[in-house]
Image: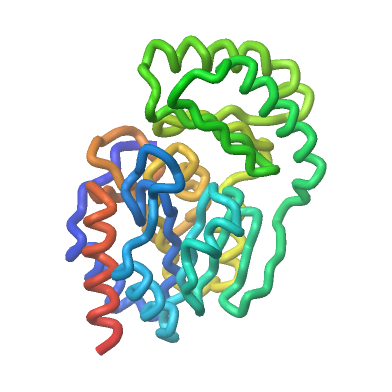
Amino acid sequence: MGTPTPITPVALAERLFTAGQVLLMLDYDGTLVPLAPTPAQARPAAVLLHILKKLGELPQYKVAVISGRTLTDLTTLFPVPGIFLIGGHGIEICSPAGEVNYLLDYKYITKIMNKLEQLAKYCLNNKDGFLIENKGYSLALHYRLVKPLMAQSALNKFIELSKPIIQKHTLNILPGKKVLEIRPLAMHKGKAVNYLQQLYPYSLAVYFGDNTTDEDAFRALKKGLSILVSAQSYNSAANFKLNSPLEVLEFLTLLEKVAGN
């Protein structure tokens, strides 16, 4: 862990121009698109979909979007042929050919998440601004629209009351950007990164992410480039740092423009 080195989109793109084969892995919320008040409001721009489609058509690039969202959600957001869509923090994988497989059997988790959802509803007590997102294999408590003191009080109550369930079923509570996520300890984006690196062992592996949920992916990159997308500098396993999704888009635009010629 250390402080990632700031880099410009141009300098980063230049590192890939002569790399030959590239495995390009991208987080979604906060990386490809800016964070929004609710997940439903974070939508990919048409120009982003166009660029990913073009990159996916090029033989030297393998493109993957890796997200904590469900695969169903990603499939709706990205009607883009030729790329990997990976949901569930790396366990639901849809290949460029449309084949789906799972890196973890999470079906047994569903009942546990339903219990935690009911507990969350009790702790949040219909307070305005909270959003409970039960994904089946994980539970996300969004509080971007809640006043800080109210959010902290309700979340602390949930954390305390959920401890017996968390410990019994080896779950992990992971704080993010105005979200608290509960998921199996064995479920993380590093699994998807390892899976893709095994498929393409001779490619330069590159991963972009903005959040604590991306640190497992950064650590899984034994070689290659890991890029934190954040306006702020902080300790991370990433090598480099871009400031925003806008800079990620600038990087992708440069990549597609040069590679397509």
Name the residue at 23% across, 55% down: 246
**Across the whole image, how many numbered discs are drawn on residues?**
0
Name the residue at 60% across, 58% down: 71
The residue nearer to you, when weighing 123 against 228, is 123
Q: On the picture, is 36 further left or further right than 13?
A: right
Indicate the colouring scheme.
Answer: rainbow
Name the residue at 35% across, 56% down: 32
Q: Is residue 12 above or below residue 240?
A: below
Name the residue at 43% across, 84% down: 57
Quarter the C terminus occupies: bottom left
- The quarter holding residue 205 reads bottom left
The residue nearer to you, when weighing 228 against 138, is 138
The residue nearer to you, when weighing 228 against 140, is 140
Q: Is residue 183 above or below residue 207?
A: above
Quarter the N terminus occupies: top left
Q: Position of residue 64 (x, y in %)?
A: 49, 66
Q: Position of residue 24 (x, y in %)?
A: 42, 67
- The quarter holding residue 164 reads top right
User: Can residue 67 be seen in this snapshot?
Assistant: yes
Q: Is residue 3 above or below residue 224?
A: above
Q: Is residue 237 above or below residue 207?
A: above
Q: Residue furthest bottom?
A: 261
Q: Position of residue 109 (x, y in %)?
A: 76, 39
User: Can residue 239 be seen in this snapshot?
Assistant: no
Q: On the picture, is 58 further left or further right than 118?
A: left
